[in-house]
Structure formats: structure tokens, C-alpha cells
Image (cartoon, rainbow, N blue to C red):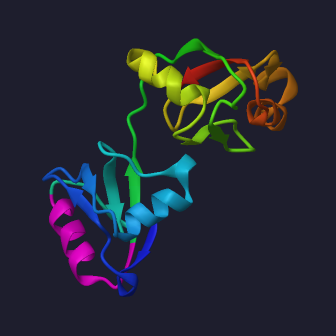
Amino acid sequence: VHFDKERGPLGIALDSNFDINSFTPDGQAAKWNSSNPSKALRNGDSVVAVNKVLRTKDGIKKMAREIQDAHKVVVVVQRVVEKAAFQWLVGVEGKTGCGLLLDSDTAEVTSLVTKGGVFEWNAAHPEIEVRVGDVVVEANGKSLERHGPKAVGMEVAKSGPMKIKVRRP
């Protein structure tokens, strides 16, 4: 991720190992996350390089200096991915839509609307709530594998009762 400190603070809190702890709402990272939800930085991501300085025993101090002193900062992060993906079926009742916005290239959930079937589903099923970053693999019989992400997205955008299968990567 490229940052220019002349545009404001980075807005990332890092621990001593250079793992991301939090973001400030007005920082560049939060703005980048809003503009790039499918590639958003997350708490727990590890910063492995800053301006080509690698995270090594001596590199952490150099990385901190780069963040502090450089006007332009390029941050490379690494994410530990959960090994076991799981999938579940979400039933949406009523006349409103499901309230999901999907990435048209991947069918990844980029936003949840506070009105709609999924919002109600999440309130009733917090242990398997639909989250940003989940992938809709099927909507009313239109599968990601057979029909593609655009067809799944069009189905999700419809109003009325709906059954969607969701996978957490």
C-alpha cells in the first residue's frame, strides 16, 4: 500500500512486532480501506516491509525510521489466512433485498446495508453472521462456479425471499 505523508497521517497503530493493532478513522489507511474493501488492511496483518526495508531483527528499527522520516511510505503486509474455510446457508424472507453489496469480479461481500434480510439474519445468528470479506458462492441457485460473480451479484441485488450460500475464506 502506498502512502504519502503530505496527505495526512497514516493512521495505523502497530505493536512492537509490526503487526497492525488498529486504525484511526481519519488516517490514510482507513481511507484506503474504504476505497479498497477487498484488499483492506486488517487488524492482525503483519507489516513485512516498509520502503523495501524488510522485517528482520535489525530491520524493525529501520522500518520504524522509514515510517517516521520518509515522505512517501510503501507498506507490504502479510496476512495469516484461516486454514479451514466454511460455508453456510442464509435464508432471507420478506420483500426487501438481502442488503449486501458484492465485488463484481469475485462476489466478495464489500458492504452490508443496515436494512435488509442479511442484517436481520446477522442479528438472529451472530455465531454465523455474514461479514465483509465473505464470498457469496450461490444465490437462489445461481452459483459462482457455474454462472460467475456477475450473475450471483445480480441475483443478490433482487428483492424478495432469497437463499444464499456464503463461504468464509
* Image height of 111 relative to 120, above or below: below
* Image height of 75 relative to 9, above or below: above
The answer to whether one can see residue 83 in this image is no
The answer to whether one can see residue 72 in this image is yes
* Closest to the observer, 32 or 47: 32
* Closest to the observer, 83 or 106: 106
Which residue is pictured at 42% across the width and 25% down the height?
82
Farthest-out residue, front: 95
Q: Quadrant of the rendered structure where residue 56 is?
A: bottom left
Q: Quadrant of the rendered structure where residue 92 is?
A: top right
Magenta residues, as a range? 58-73
Q: Is residue 157 left or right of residue 33?
A: right
Which residue is pictured at 13% across the width and 53% down the height?
16
Which residue is pictured at 47% across the width and 57% down the height?
33
Q: Is residue 27 left or right of residue 107?
A: left
Q: Is residue 167 left or right of residue 163?
A: left
Q: Is residue 78 left or right of residue 101?
A: left
